[in-house]
Image (cartoon, helix red, strand yellow):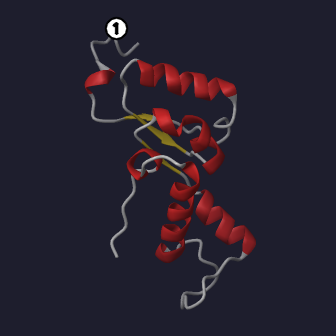
Amino acid sequence: MHREAGVDLTQEPLVGLGSVCKRVSSADIAAIVTTLAARGIPLHCFGVKRDGLARIGHAISSADSLAWSATARRSGIRLPGCVHRGPCNNCPRYARQWWQETVDVQNVPQQTALALSFAA
């Protein structure tokens, strides 16, 4: 439909695909992502969990997820030294830690695994 409307997605800096959070571990979303990436479409996938990155991380430009926040909230995770009320579900320190752990387990360059940066 984009092509028919005269929109060349390969010329866009980034094209959003999502939310894939409910389907990211399935073969069908992997097929969609790899097909679009093979056509030269730079993809940002919304709602990608760690296990999903293992499957599609090589084919995307960036991804995001709130899995870190949900995990902190549900598990009551609170990093030592945090002074905020409640768990670290909105904590920049915990978000950075989660991001680093995610990048470390993916075995792919950081800019491919997750295109995120955090100010120190």
How many C-alpha atoms fall within 10 Å of the one at disc 1: few (<14), some, or many (≥20)?
A: few
In depth, the one of 98 and 68 nearer the eye is 98
The single residue placed furthest to the front in the displayed view is: 107
Q: Is residue 30 above or below residue 73?
A: above
| Residue at figure coordinates x 32%, y 23% from the top left | 9
Q: What is the number of callouts on the image?
A: 1
The single residue placed furthest to the top in the displayed view is: 4
Q: Quadrant of residue 86?
A: bottom right
Judge left or right: residue 60 versus residue 55. Answer: left
Q: Quadrant of residue 29?
A: top right
Q: Is residue 92 above or below residue 103?
A: below
| Residue at figure coordinates x 59%, y 54% from the top left | 105
Q: Amino acid at mark 1?
A: Glu
| Residue at figure coordinates x 47%, y 47% from the top left | 113
Judge left or right: residue 72 versus residue 2. Answer: right
Image spot of residue 74 (x, y percent): 73, 68
Image spot of residue 64 (x, y percent): 49, 50
Q: Of helix, strand and loop, which one carries label 1?
A: loop
| Residue at figure coordinates x 36%, y 61% from the top left | 117
Judge left or right: residue 58 versus residue 68. Answer: left
| Quadrant for the N terminus in the image | top left
Image spot of residue 23 (x, y percent): 67, 35
In depth, the one of 110 and 70 nearer the eye is 110
| Quadrant for the C terminus in the image | bottom left
Residue at numbered disc 1: 4
Image spot of residue 28 (x, y percent): 65, 24
